[in-house]
Image: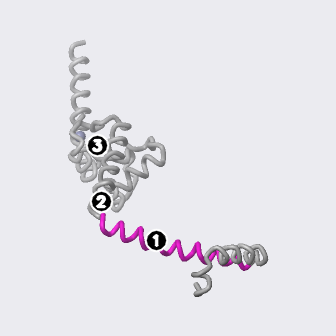
Amino acid sequence: MSKWQKEHPIEAAIYRRKWALDNPEKEMENDKRRYQRDRTKRAAANKKWNDSHRELLRERANAKNREIRKDVLKHYGDRCACCGETEPKFLAIDHINGRGDKNNRDKRVTASFYRWIQKNDYPKDLQILCHNCNCAKGFYGECPHQSFKIKELFNSEVVVVIAK
Ligand SMILES: [Zn+2]
Ligand SMILES: [Zn+2]
């Protein structure tokens, strides 16, 4: 800003407005440049704020993630589909048909997976398993609870047959 502009702010403003009307294309370019400059400034200010509020932001993100996980677990019945465990800390989301390779298995406990489930409208091929049942299914292809159930069913049918 020149000395004259500083001493005559009103005249300078009038002159600027007139100039802008006479040079619409240059004025548009100036606008763009100002917008870019302000955007850089805004980004810098945001970064500064974020840097000095890291703890708060992390806490906020964690709270949001807990909320999402709670919602997803609720949607799938809040209990292990195999043994009925209800302690949320033991529960995880499982692909019913064992889809998802080893890498995906690690992703199952991450916040982004729960967000993905919400965004994809709670896919039908997912269920809740507790970590016990989930690991057993991973190791043996089936949780022992399931073979017990089959045995129990078999035994009760044998009893029925004998009773006849
Ligand atoms: Zn279980
Ligand atoms: Zn089980």
| Amino acid at dot 1 | Ala
Kindly state the secondary structure of the residue where label 1 is placed: helix
The residues tagged by marks 3 and 2 sit, at their Cα atoms, a distance apart of 28 Å
Mark 3 or mark 2: name the one nearer the start of the chain.
Answer: 2
The boundaries of the magenta stretch are 26-53
Do residues under tags 1 and 3 come within 8 Å of each other at their CB atoms? Answer: no
Residue 43 - label = 1
Give the residue at mark 2: 58
Mark 2 or mark 1: name the one nearer the start of the chain.
Answer: 1
- Residue plotted at (29% across, 58% down): 56
Displayed-image quarter of ligand 1: top left
Q: Is residue 44 left or right of residue 134?
A: right
Residue 77 - label = none
User: In the rendering, at what x and y percent does residue 10 appear?
Assistant: 64, 73
Kindly state the secondary structure of the residue where label 2 is placed: helix
Kindly state the secondary structure of the residue where label 3 is placed: strand
| Amino acid at dot 3 | Leu
Give the residue at mark 3: 129
Do residues under tags 2 and 1 come within 8 Å of each other at their CB atoms? Answer: no
